[in-house]
Image: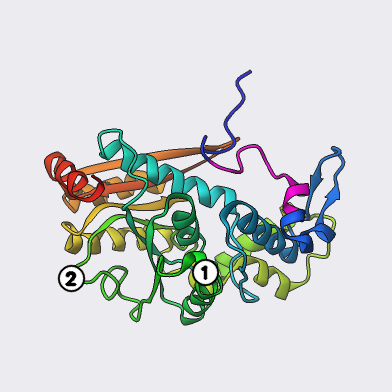
Amino acid sequence: MTVKPQHHPRNAHKNGYDFDALCQSYPQLKPHVFINQYSKQTIDFSDSQAVIALNTALLRHHYNINEWSIPKGFLCPAIPGRADYIHYLADLLKETNNNKPAFKNVTALDIGTGASCIYSLLGNRIYDWKMVASDIDPKSIDNANAIIKANQALSNQIDCRLQTSEKYIFRNIIHNDEYFDITLCNPPFHESIEQGMSGTQRKWNNLNKSKDRNKKSEVLNFGGQNAELWCKGGELSFVKNMIKESRSYSKQVLWFTSLISKKDNVSKLKLALKKANAIETKVIKMEQGNKISRFIAWSFLTDDERSDWCQKRFE
């Protein structure tokens, strides 16, 4: 029987969590750690405070981010899966760069960074990428800036920008004289706040069937803010709008990318990219045990233009 990979080969979390080491790095995690029925150390993943403590420990232990927190009510990301996306993006850049690592000298744009700023933090700490982190929520931008300010290692590495219009994704964020090697996005999944709340409740129930399920405020706290969870038309509409708008920045970005949660959306987005005259389109799968996630990537540059880009930017 073939053992399915849990994470990308370069993922620091591919072999699970070393709770003893994590508790040494962040002692506040220790009260949340217990031995489960399989004699393994773990935490209660339905407890938002336990997950926040785990994330803080992971960021401190593996990524030299000593100060990290999110306000109550904001999405608390699972770091291993987020790190996978960053590693696969690095692989895409390497492939584009004639299989030579393009780990440094990369500038990336993180669309919808959230209060956690997680993708920008990981992109910078893993690969030393310069990051621009955008979000439409002022509270998210304020918290992301607070994280950056609290960690000297992040000084001048991440530029947070507030998107002032719900109509746009790249406009107001990408300046006329700017170039990005890659963009990344974890788009809002749900089509309405009711759908978002229902999905969050399902996650809560699956994680913790023995606990009180009637703590509505805690469910919302664990689930994330409105802008993080839903938008009109859901994931498909959001990414279609991203594709449409990306045409205006076709010569300023090497690769546009977005995570795609719903497999059924892939074919529809491929058609949208064909209509937008994207020259190159890729769908990249990321295996995490029995779960397969994916992101779609597109470029408006020809092979020769991508080669020239790499020579100018990465060499």
At horizontal 61% and vertical 57% (from top left) the residue drawn is: 59
Please identify the dominant SS of the magenta region: loop
Disc 1 from disc 2: Cα separation? 29 Å
SS for dot 1 = helix
At 39% across and 49% down in the image, what residue appears? 265
Position of 19 with respect to 181 (left or right) is right
Category of crowding for the residue at label 1, using alpha-carbon neighbours closer than 10 angstroms: few (below 14), some (14–19), many (at least 20): some
- Per the image, the residue denoted by label 1 is 152
x and y percentages locating residue 89 in the rendered image: 39, 46
Q: Which of the image's four quarters has the N terminus?
A: top right
Q: Is residue 302 magenta?
A: no
- Residue 137 appears left or right of 255: right
Can the viewer see residue 262?
no
Residue that sits furthest to the top in the current view: 1
Q: Nearer the viewer, residue 30 or 201?
A: 30
Q: Position of residue 40 (x, y in %)?
A: 82, 40
Question: Which of labels 1 and 2 is toward the front?
Answer: 1
**Is residue 89 among what the camera can see?**
yes
Amino acid type at mark 2: Asn
The residue at which mark 2 appears reads as 176
The residue positioned 54% from the left and 41% from the top of the image is 11
Q: Between residues 276 and 284, which one lies in front from this camera angle?
A: 284
Q: In the structure shown, which secondary structural element does the residue marked by tag 2 occupy?
A: loop
Q: Nearer the viewer, residue 107 or 45?
A: 107
- Residue 20 sits inside the magenta stretch: yes
Write down the region rendered in magenta. 11-22
What kind of residue is marked 1? Gln
Question: Taking 70 as reference, is 287 above or below it?
Answer: above
> Around disc 2, counting alpha carbons within 10 Å, would you say few (fewer than 14), some (14 to 19), or many (20 or more)?
few
Tell me where residue 281 appears, x and y as whole percent: 26, 43
Q: Which mark is residue 36?
A: none
Q: Quadrant of the C terminus?
A: top left
